[in-house]
Amino acid sequence: MSRPHVVGVAGSLRDDSYTRVGVERALDAAREAGATTELLDLREFDLPVFDADDGKAGDAPELTDAVREADAILLGTPVYHGSYSAPLKNALDYCGFDEFENKTVGLLAVAGGSFPITALEHLRSVCRALNCWVIPHQAAIPQARNSVENGEIVDADVEDRVATLGEEAVQYANIEPDPPCLESTENVGADD
């Protein structure tokens, strides 16, 4: 069996993004577990606001190709108003079943406060609508300013959760997919 390929999508546009630090750490753990990895830093993509009439605008083909070629995908987001970021939403809108169906997906959320769970629930729902297999373990970095210093996760418990996410992305990269879930069979717009 070839080495699984894991891509991590950093859904923050900040220069000193805690989300990027978390995604990079999860990718490091995936690499240590035997995968090839690639960071998809949304700051580096020209992705106009999604318009269904122009689904290949800007760098969308580059993004969708990279996601499609992955065996497992890590989605990282800062928490904004209890949900995931607009840049990540926009990137996901360019994708559909071709990129996500039957893929293993791991979720990571980063919050300035102490409750990043709703963003993870929202992403889990999106992934189910795209018929992904979402890793049960999810990673959260609450109160990120206390957990990340100089580009490193300094809280041992948080670091362990994030590393475990990367390891499980490799472990489950080739899991036998479940039958299509109800959410995905009703998501007719995703395959347009």
Image (spheres, rainbow, N blue to C red):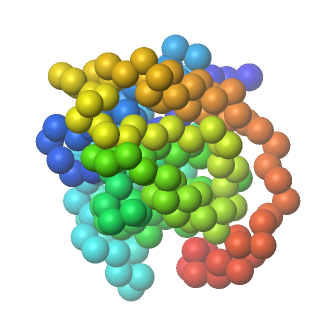
Which of the 4 image quarters holds residue 91? bottom left
Residue at figure coordinates x 18%, y 47% from the top left: 14
Residue at figure coordinates x 16%, y 38% from the top left: 16
| Most foreground residue, 62 or 19 | 19
Which of the 4 image quarters holds residue 110? top left
**Outermost residue to the right:** 179
Residue at figure coordinates x 74%, y 23% from the top left: 1
Q: Answer above or below: position of 27 versus 66.
A: above
Q: Is residue 99 left or right of residue 49?
A: right
Q: Answer above or below: position of 73 versus 181.
A: above
Picture coordinates of residue 19, whole percent (x, y): 32, 41
Picture coordinates of residue 118, whole percent (x, y): 49, 59
Q: Answer above or below: position of 56 versus 170.
A: below
**Outermost residue to the bottom:** 53
Picture coordinates of residue 147, whole percent (x, y): 31, 28
Indicate the quadrant containing the C terminus: top left, top right, bottom left or bottom right: bottom right
Q: Answer above or below: position of 59 versus 150.
A: below
Q: Is residue 175 left or right of residue 25?
A: right
| Most foreground residue, 64 or 141 | 141
